[in-house]
Amino acid sequence: MNNIHTTELLARLRPLRAAALSAFFVLSAPLCAQDSAESIAIVTPDQPNAIEIGTPSLPGAKTQESWHRQYGKQFARNVTVATLTPFLPDPAKASGAAVIVAPGGGFFSLSMENEGWDVARALADKGIAAFVLKYRLNQTAEKLIDFEAAMAARFNQPGAQPPRPTPEEMKTRIAPQLEDARAAFALIRSRSEEWKIDTDRIGMVGFSAGAMLTMATALEGVDAKPAFIGNVYGPLMAVDVPKDAPPLFVALAADDPFFASSGFGLIESWRAANKPVEFHYYEQGGHGFGMYPKDTTSTGWFNAFVDWMTMHGMFKPKVG
């Protein structure tokens, strides 16, 4: 992988810094009353189709990958080796389009089921090849109880504020994840013939911290060049939009506790650059709704995303 020019990276990511401070420490939560918020450690599930994407093991990592169940779904922590899991559609309905799915979890965990596998299965059912990116994470405590205690101590105190890293620290924190995203695009393109994928129709959708990674991939992914991107309850800070910016889909709930009150700079940036953008601002839904069934219109984001891709011709094979 080629190194990203540091000066350009910092310039592009600086507008996202404030939002990222929250994203790094936000654990995706569906806020569904019927699901227990208690975290329970589980055995690492079988992932027979997961493909190591070739980026190095997380530098300096001492704690190895572990999993837990929360809100009725599976989460991963301490990911040190990035993988990509394909969910390929029935060949009879395959469109040729593909989407890399980036789960959220504050870069401390990954909501692998709700914001990963469940999304990918639904996309495959629509004829879209989906690939769940299990990207490397910041290290946390080995024991789940210690991890929860650390998060509670950080955020449950009155007036608690997340650390405010410098731009250089920000670059360091997001560099492994951005490298993973770039490698995922490269892997899919290298096997596009095998997977029957049109290399001009590979996009990315991310949730919360995964949405930040999606935006960073579009802004500074260099060779990634997604054909379209989806930002689902992620940061909406203004950015410098590149000339080759892809169409952007955004979904956010008005009662999202993290990103609903920071303005709509990202939308305005895309519009000012005369780039396609669609924005769904749901009255209710909270944060982390993903594919959870909820009695709010935010559950409509998935069908809206597929309709948006259809409108942009992602289901039409290229001619010639």
Image (spheres, rainbow, N blue to C red):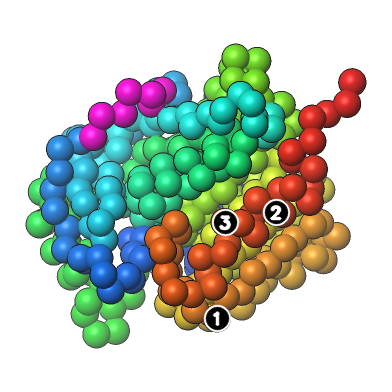
Q: Are marks 2 and 1 in contact (CB under 8 Å)?
A: no
Q: Is residue 273 left or right of residue 155?
A: right
Mark 3 and mark 1: Cα distance apart in space: 16 Å
Left or right: 230 as drawn, with respect to 114: right
The residue indicated by pointer 2 is 307
Q: Which residues are magenta?
A: 45-51
Whether residue 88 is visible, yes or no, is yes
Q: Residue at x 42, y 69 (%)?
A: 294
Look at the image and say whether residue 47 sits in the magenta stretch. Answer: yes
Asked if residue 230 is among those painted magenta in the image, a careful observer would answer no
Q: Secondary structure at mark 2?
A: helix
Residue type, label 3: Phe
Name the side, left or right, on which 239 lies relative to 109.
right
Instruction: Please provide percent x and percent y for residue 265.
Output: 67, 71
Q: Main secondary structure of the magenta part?
A: loop
- Circle 3 sits on which residue? 302
How far apart are labels 2 and 3 at the CA level? 9 Å
Mark 2 crowdedness (10 Å alpha carbons): few <14, some 14-19, many ≥20: few
> Which of disc 1 and disc 2 is earlier in sequence?
1
Can you say whether 90 is above or below 236 in the image? Answer: above
Q: Is 148 drawn above or below residue 127 in the view shown?
A: below
Label ID, residue 138 = none
